């Protein structure tokens, strides 16, 4: 279930009925969400869904056609009135790092601290470099650092002016998979340690789930669901969110009652009550973790595809021409192509939608 709303006084960032775009046309329409102090939010969705457009509006680079953005209860964007980016106390970490190649790492981090005395600026810079574990590279230059190290410098530079909010624009997309995973968790730890809120833009679901407290799923400029990762996976608001988040596919079913569905995989009992009439034709979402190996089961679908992944193997099973589904088993359970495997459904969270067409 969706968590209870936080009282308005506790919101750091509020986006109300936001519509904005380019050339007078709205790319993003009627977007609403709010972020609490110290939380990390995420804008997640396929290419062209409006993630970067919303981020540009938050940063003050794009005016609003309709709606309002509030930061600490102050309106920073309204139609016809946009507070300048440099006055918003919002930090930005770019996809390409945007470091100054002719400045040392220390000078990059301290670039926005010219109001401080030289000694105070150096102390602040070294505190930040220590925080991102780069204190030994203060006198190096960007070209001497790895991609992950450059990203840490970019984060330290964004944190230096002590912003109220940090915006992260696909910050790990140029890194290899393993480094990307480790660095995203490091950045989360740093932000949580400092109590600084952030908005991350990404198309990587694993990154969004591991790093963020709240996630906005976007499609065609429209917000589909703003929720905690657990609810997005187990309680999707609509068919798009159900299909986009995680793995899985739909199989045909027929409603027997508010929480019971008949299907080729047997009768499926769930944890939530719908308002269908008995006999309603449904599409039932089956995720790989909904299927368990059961030697005593009479349901024995055929293996039509398998993908070995070390600790586990992803199988695709077929019951009939209209019913295929995936299952994730530990790799010690090794089945051959064409083999009929005894399985059963254990879907603790029942996700289904009335059939289209």
Image (cartoon, rainbow, N blue to C red):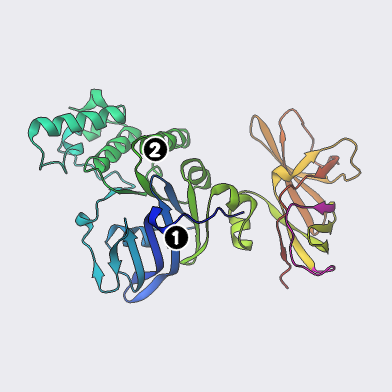
The magenta region covers 267-280
From the viewer's perspective, is 168 left or right of 317? Answer: left
Residue at image coords 44%, 64% = 32
Q: Residue furthest bottom?
A: 24
37 vs 147: above or below: below
Q: Position of residue 351 (x, y in %)?
A: 70, 56
The question of residue 264 being in magenta is answered with: no
Mark 2 falls on what kind of element? helix
Q: Residues within 10 Å of mark 2 (few under 14, many from 20)?
A: some
The quadrant the N terminus occupies is bottom right
From the viewer's perspective, is 53 left or right of 237? Answer: left
> Foreground: 36 or 317?
36
Q: Position of residue 251 (x, y in %)?
A: 76, 58
> Visible in this render: residue 209?
yes
Name the residue beneath numbered marker 1.
33
Name the residue beneath numbered marker 2.
192
Q: Is the Cβ of the residue at disc 1 closer than 8 Å to that at disc 2?
A: no
Residue at image coords 10%, 30% = 119
> Foreground: 50 or 324?
50
The image quadrant of residue 54 is bottom left
341 vs 266: above or below: above
Q: Which mark is residue 268?
A: none
């Amino acid at each position: 279930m969706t968590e209870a709303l936080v009282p308005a006084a506790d919101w750091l960032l509020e986006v109300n009925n936001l519509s904005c775009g380019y050339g007078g046309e709205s790319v993003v329409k009627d977007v609403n969400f709010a972020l609490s102090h110290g939380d990390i939010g995420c804008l997640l969705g396929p290419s062209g869904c409006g993630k970067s457009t919303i981020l540009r509006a938050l940063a003050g680079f794009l005016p609003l056609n309709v709606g309002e953005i509030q930061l600490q209860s102050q309106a920073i964007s309204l139609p016809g009135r946009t507070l300048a980016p440099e006055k918003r106390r919002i930090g930005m970490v770019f996809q390409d790092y945007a470091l100054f190649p002719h400045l040392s790492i220390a000078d990059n981090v301290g670039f926005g601290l010219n109001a401080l005395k030289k000694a105070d600026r150096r102390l602040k810079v070294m505190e930040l470099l220590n925080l991102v574990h780069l204190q030994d590279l203060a006198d190096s230059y960007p070209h001497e650092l790895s991609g992950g190290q450059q990203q840490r410098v970019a984060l330290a530079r964004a944190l230096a002016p002590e912003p109220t909010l940090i915006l992260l624009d696909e910050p790990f997309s140029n890194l290899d998979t393993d480094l990307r995973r480790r660095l995203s968790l490091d950045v989360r730890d740093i932000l949580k340690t400092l109590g600084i809120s952030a908005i991350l833009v990404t198309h990587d679901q694993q990154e969004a789930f591991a790093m963020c407290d709240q996630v906005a799923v976007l499609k065609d400029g429209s917000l589909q669901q703003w929720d905690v990762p657990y609810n997005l996976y187990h309680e999707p608001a609509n068919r798009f969110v159900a299909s986009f988040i995680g793995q899985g596919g739909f199989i045909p079913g027929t409603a027997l009652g508010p929480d019971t569905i008949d299907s080729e995989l047997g009768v499926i009992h769930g944890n939530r009550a719908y308002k269908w009439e008995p006999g309603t034709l449904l599409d039932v979402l089956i995720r790989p973790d909904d299927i368990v190996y059961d030697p005593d089961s009479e349901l024995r679908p055929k293996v039509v595809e398998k993908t070995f992944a070390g600790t586990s193997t992803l199988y695709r099973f077929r019951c009939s021409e209209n019913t295929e589904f995936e299952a994730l088993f530990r790799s010690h359970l090794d089945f051959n192509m064409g083999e009929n495997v005894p399985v059963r459904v254990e879907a603790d969270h029942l996700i289904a939608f009335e059939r289209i067409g």
